[in-house]
Amino acid sequence: MKFNGKIVASFAILLCVFFAISVMSYAASTVIVYNGNASSGWYGSGTFNTSTACGYDGSMYYQNAASGSNAIGGWNVKPTSTGNDDYYVYITSCHAYAQALYSAWDGDGNRVDLNVNQNNYSNIFYYLGNYYVAPNGPNGIQVSTYSSTGELGFDEAKFYN
């Protein structure tokens, strides 16, 4: 049996393009939102202390809930299409000793509240769950001294799909 070289070459090219598109469609992505960097998706209000003794990138914010100085920190992700993301927050080795109430929002505006004792963890991305995300949705995480007790650490958040 004889094969036409042009047909075989065309088929091979189409097969390569198909596999390349398939891999790109399912490729995982990770977005890290840095505290203090509004362009990456961070927002904060209130009074924060800063530490360069620890943190995912060498610095972090913190505030003691009992100090009377209120602080709210949040991290948003802006996906380009709908899907599901794993939400994480980075808990540092210092200034993160609070019983923290994190609120996670999905792409439809549904909120889930999660109690996390920061004192039980050190230098890890703590998993908050898997959530539906959508472009223009509120997709994100928030924590504040209003709903937490102790010294509350605000560092990075990670969104992974």
Image (tube, rainbow, N blue to C red):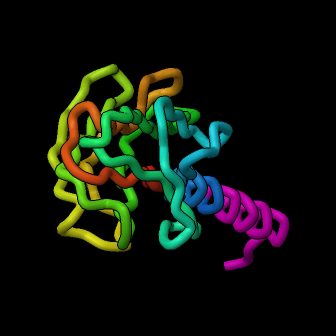
Image-based side of 86 in relation to 148, left or right: right
**Residue furthest right in the image:** 6
Percent coordinates x, y for residue 125 in the rendering: 36, 64
Residue 69 higher or lower than 36, as above or below: above
Rendered residue at 43%/38% (across/down): 73
Let me know if residue 86 appears in the view: yes
Residue 52 higher or lower than 42, as above or below: below
Residue 65 higher or lower than 147, as above or below: below
Residue range in magenta is 1-18
Image-based side of 5 in relation to 73, left or right: right
**Residue furthest front in the image:** 67
Residue 130 higher or lower than 111, as above or below: below
Percent coordinates x, y for residue 146 in the rendering: 26, 31
Q: Which secondary structure type mostly characterizes the magenta part of the structure?
A: helix
Q: On the image, which quarter does residue 97 sit in?
A: bottom left
Residue 12 highlighted magenta (yes or no): yes
Rendered residue at 24%/69% (across/down): 121
Q: Quadrant of the N terminus?
A: bottom right
Percent coordinates x, y for residue 116 in the rendering: 18, 52
